[in-house]
Image: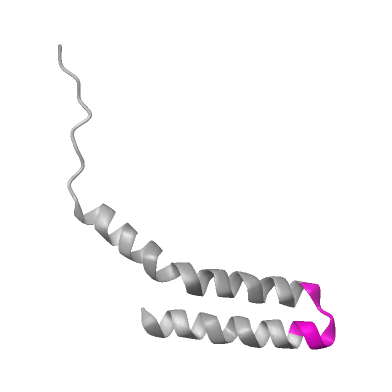
Amino acid sequence: MAYLEFSCFLAGLLALVVGYRRHKRNLLLIGAFAWLLAGGLGDFSQGLADGLATPRPSLSHTK
């Protein structure tokens, strides 16, 4: 997972630098989303794995 986060960080950095120098707003937006993904991907995947691993309570209601 660390490799994926690091590659998203580098891709975001590259997109931000190139987008800033060439005045491409869409590339700046892509770079910002890549940095957002790099910052939250590890926590999201850990929470998803924990949520799928824990048993869910039964929702059946009997009277």
Residue at image location 17% in from the left, 46% down from the top: 55
Residue 61 horizontal/vertical position (percent): 19, 20
Say which quadrant the C terminus sits in.
top left
Q: In which quarter of the image is residue 30?
A: bottom right
Magenta: main secondary structure? helix
Determine the residue located farthest toward the left in the rendered image: 63
Task: Assess whether residue 51 is covered by the magenta stretch.
Answer: no
Residue 54 horizontal/vertical position (percent): 19, 51
* Residue 60, above or below 44: above
Residue at image location 81% in from the left, 78% down from the top: 24
Q: Relative to residue 27, is residue 45 drawn left or right?
A: left
Q: Relative to residue 10, is residue 14 drawn left or right?
A: right
Q: In which quarter of the image is residue 57?
A: top left
Residue at image location 73% in from the left, 77% down from the top: 27
What is the magenta range?
19-25
Residue at image location 67% in from the left, 83% down from the top: 15
